[in-house]
Amino acid sequence: MRFRYRAYMGGPDPLADPDPPPEEAVVAARELLALVASVSGTGPGSEPGSASEEDRLELAALERALSRYADGDRGALGGVDAVALERLLDRLSGREAGRALARLDEADHGLSPRELRRLGEVALRDAGVSRHGRGARGGVHRGGTASGGEPTGSSRLFGEDGDRPLDAVATVREAALRRSRPGERDVALRAEDVRVVETEPSEAAAVSLLVDLSHSMAARSLHEAATRTALALHALVSTHRPEDRLHLVGFGERARELSPGELVAHDWRRVPGTNLHHALRLARAHLRRHCGLRSQVLVVTDGEPTAHLGEDGDARFAWPPAPRTVELTVAELDAVLGEGAEVTFFLLADDPRLRAFQALVERRRGVRVVHAGAEGLGALVVERYLDRSG
C-alpha cells in the first residue's frame, strides 16, 4: 500500500505527518473492516470459531489499524504487512478480500500535492540546495526572480525577490537621506537602508529530464537515486524557477511523460528495453511546444539504448542492441540538438557497450557526458540545471 513510498527518501520520514486519507479510501477501509469482523467472529452474522486463535489475534490487530485509518489516521497501516494480510484474508474469506484490498490500495495509492512537496524539499536538501536556491557548490540559482540578468541601473529594497548583489552606493544614499531626518542620526545604518542591484530577468528554459526506468536501474539500486533526483529538480523549478517548463519522461521498453507522483509510484517491474529513442522524441516535442525558451535535456541512464520505435509505433527490443536501434537513437539526438538544445548524459554505469555509446554521442557538439554514482546524482543534475553557461 501507500506506506511503501517512505523507503525512498532515507533519513527523517518526510511523510511522518501524513494528510488524512481520501474519502474513497476511507470507504474501502470500512468495507475491509466489515470483512475482517465477519471472518474473525466479531461481526454481525459471523460464526464464532471460524478462525483459529492465532488468526483472531492477527485480525484483531488489523481491525484496530483499520479503525484508526478510517477515523483519519493515514499512518495507521504503516506497520501492516500487505502481503501477509492478503494471504490471511484470502485463506479465510476467498477472493472477496483481495478485491477489497485492491480497492483500498488503488484509492490511497498516490501522494497528495503537499506530501509530494515535502518529498521534493527533502530531495532538494539531499542534493545540496538550500531553500534559497543555493547550489551544492555555493552558487546562487539565477532566475527571473533572482540575480543573474543584466543590471537595469536601478536598485531595490533588500529581501525582495531573492538574492541579489548589494548596491553599496544606493545603500549609503538611503542611509544618508534617513539620517538627515530628525531623530535618525544616532544609527548609521538600518536594515531598511540596504539596497540591492535590480536586474533584468534571465531567460527561461524548457527542460526535459529523461529517467531510465529499465529493470537494471533497480537491480543496481539506482532507482531511488533517480527518483530523488527528479523530485529535487521538480521542487527546485517549482519554488525558484516557475517560469521554466520542466518535462519529466520515463523510458523503458517505451517512453512516457510522467508526473513526479507517477514516478514515485513506478513499480520497476522486470521489463526489458531502454528506449532512449522514444524518450528523445518526446523531449523534442516538449522543446517545440516551448520553442521561444532555452532548451535543455538531461538524461539519466545506466545503459546503452536497447529498444526503438518502429514505423508502426511499436517498440523493437534487441539484446545485444541492434545497429538500427543505435542509428535511430543517434538520429533523434541529432534532431534534438538541431532544436538548439544542450544535452547532458548522466551515466550511472561503466561497461564496454555503454562506453562505446558514450564515444558516439560525445562527438556531437552540444552534448556533455557526466559519470555519476547514486549518492552524487542529485547534486550533479541540479548543478547542471543551474549552470546554463553551456
Image (tube, grey):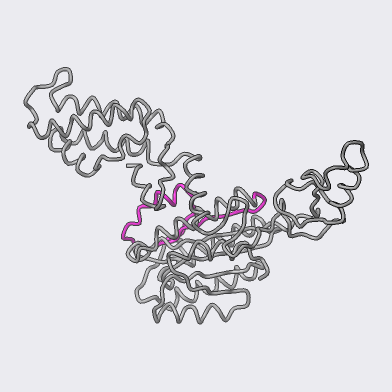
Residue 337 seen in the figure: yes
368 versus 55 height, above or below: below
Residue 14 falls in image quadrant:
top left
Q: Residue 133 in the image: x percent, y percent?
A: 62, 54
Residue 21 falls in image quadrant:
top left
152 versus 87 height, above or below: below
Query: Depth check: 40 or 285 in front?
Result: 40
Q: Residue 138 in the image: x percent, y percent?
A: 62, 62
**Magenta region, residue range:** 242-271
Residue 259 in the magenta stretch? The answer is: yes
Residue 243 in the magenta stretch? The answer is: yes
Please give the name of the residue rendered at 71% of the width and 51% of the height, measured from the top-left corner.
Answer: 145
Residue 309 seen in the figure: no
Query: Depth check: 369 or 137 in front?
Result: 137
Question: How many labels sit on residues?
Answer: 0
Query: Depth check: 235 or 50 in front?
Result: 235
Q: Residue 121 in the image: x percent, y percent?
A: 52, 49
Residue 100 vs residue 369: left or right? left
Please give the name of the residue rendered at 31% of the width and 28% of the height, measured from the top-left corner.
Answer: 68
Quarter occupied by the C terminus:
bottom right
User: Which residue is at the far top?
Assistant: 44
